[in-house]
Amino acid sequence: MDARRSVLILASFVIVTLIPAARSAARERVGHVDVFIMLDESGSMKPVFGKVTAFIAEALVRDYLEPDDYLCMVGFSDAPRIRVSQRLGSAAEKGNLIEIVRDLNVVPEGHTDMGRALEATTRQIETLAHPAHQPIVLVVTDGLNQPPRDSAYFNPVRPDRGVGFAPPSSFNAAFLEQACRCTARGHKIHVVGIGLETDAESLARALSGTHTILRSFQIDELRRALAGFWDETINLVALDSPAGAFRAGTTVSLRARLRSSTDKDGAVILSGVRIARLDRHVGGGAEAAPVEGLRIDLARTEWPVPARGEAAFEVRLTLPERFVPGDYAATIEFEQESAVRFYPPQAALTFHVPSFWELHGRVVVVSVMLALAVLVGAILYRRRPVSVTIAIEGETPPAPPRPVRIAIGHAFPVGGGATDRFRVPGLPRRVAVFERRSVESFAVLSSQPEIMPTVPEYGLGDPVEVRGDVRRTVRFIRAGHRGKRPRPQRPRPTHAAAKRAPGGIDFR
């Protein structure tokens, strides 16, 4: 029973201690950060300096920073010094950076010139901060602003005797100018004051930041104080675009999604949005494309974001009428003017602009194929074989003439005899050839024009005078059209022998 109780106590201890630690290590931020630390190295920091660097190495570098994040540490006393400046490229570099920060070889001494430190830090931010990363400024100090007498930020709050250490200074105009320069980019700033006598609160107010006051340096207390500061961010999660192609000459609605990890409602104010870069994919690579004609704007300029919630806002992209088709990759940059900002300020957008054939090619092909099918069908229908028979005026044959299916270019003999297709009683056998020339034109090629005249071209239903033992008028008609009105007669030779048409058959 005692062994079981021991196991339960140990399990409870693990749950109580390790699970909250794991939760605190889980960060909600999106994107990358550039962290700038202003670390007080004055003589009064000597008792706690090693504890502070160990805390930064573990709570910041180990638990918070990720590959592609940046860390810059500016130590300051009489003058600022760059102690660390490194962008993490891998997990191995992260482990190396932890050791560098923890074992920082510095002996605290001298004054506390916060103005020079702020000036150096601002210069590093302007030079090294990535525009798409969230900049964070952390100030750690245990005392008052106490620059040396030769500093531009020396502004004593009490009479200076000119000997020994200079008295503390207030924040003069030069300092406030540097503060405005630092805060103009919308950095997150937090000041940690250690001890009972510190300018941390007034410094945080000058920098429009937050602050934490520690009566003595307590790692757990500082970890709790900074946990919210690390995670309090508004992040641009994604720039969603509708599925499908972006047609030239249309306006596409995009959705910028922001997510807040802070405990307070916030609002971001934007002055505009622009296309920072546009590339067009050609072959296996990409080339820069002009952005002229492309228009992008905001549906609204104030974007409220609820505490620990998500909000979406419309961004409209308009393509010109004559936009070159292809695959594009654009970098959209949001211009923010409020102190509260989201990160990263840029978003990637890929889209495809279809060509004419992509949009209408199928319809065109199907339409052309249908038109060709109709045309070919009409031609084949008109050129189809038709059933033709012969009608002899004034006589009723003993049996209805047998219809003959005849196509264009085909020919059949005309004359007497039971084997002839077009039989005329009283005529010698095969005195002419009936030939279909085109859809509506026919010919009779006679080998005995004195009996049956050669008719080079005529239409079905035209009368043909035949001289045999008895004169007859015959008509070649379509089967089933016997009772219809005959077509008007065309001029044709009657007795004279006409020249035999090419392709005719002479049975003489």
Image (cartoon, grey):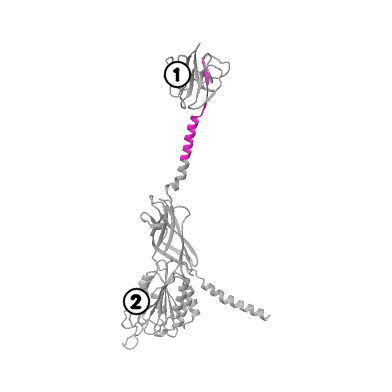
Q: Quadrant of residue 333?
A: bottom left
Tell me the amino acid under the disc marked 2: Phe
Q: Is label 2 in a helix, a strand or a loop?
A: helix
Q: Is residue 466 above or below residue 385?
A: above
Q: What is the residue that sits farthest to the top in this orientation?
A: 469
Which residue in the protein does label 2 denote?
A: 175
Query: Which percent across, then down, holds residue 48?
Result: 45, 83
Tell me the amino acid under the disc marked 1: Thr
Is residue 384 found inside the magenta-colored segment of the image? yes
Tally the numbered discs.
2
- In front: 197, or 224? 224
Q: Is residue 213 visible?
A: no
Is residue 82 found inside the magenta-colored segment of the image? no
Which residue in the protein does label 1 denote?
A: 454
Q: Quadrant of residue 302?
A: bottom left
Query: Which percent across, then down, holds residue 248?
Result: 41, 51
Q: Earlier in the sequence, mark 2 or mark 1?
A: 2
- Quadrant where the N terminus sits is bottom right
- In front: 155, or 241? 241
- In front: 176, or 504? 504
**Start-end of magenta stretch:** 368-393
Q: Quadrant of residue 162?
A: bottom left
Q: CA distance from mark 2 to mark 1?
A: 119 Å
Q: Is residue 451 above or below residue 167?
A: above
Query: Which percent across, then down, holds residue 42?
Result: 39, 83
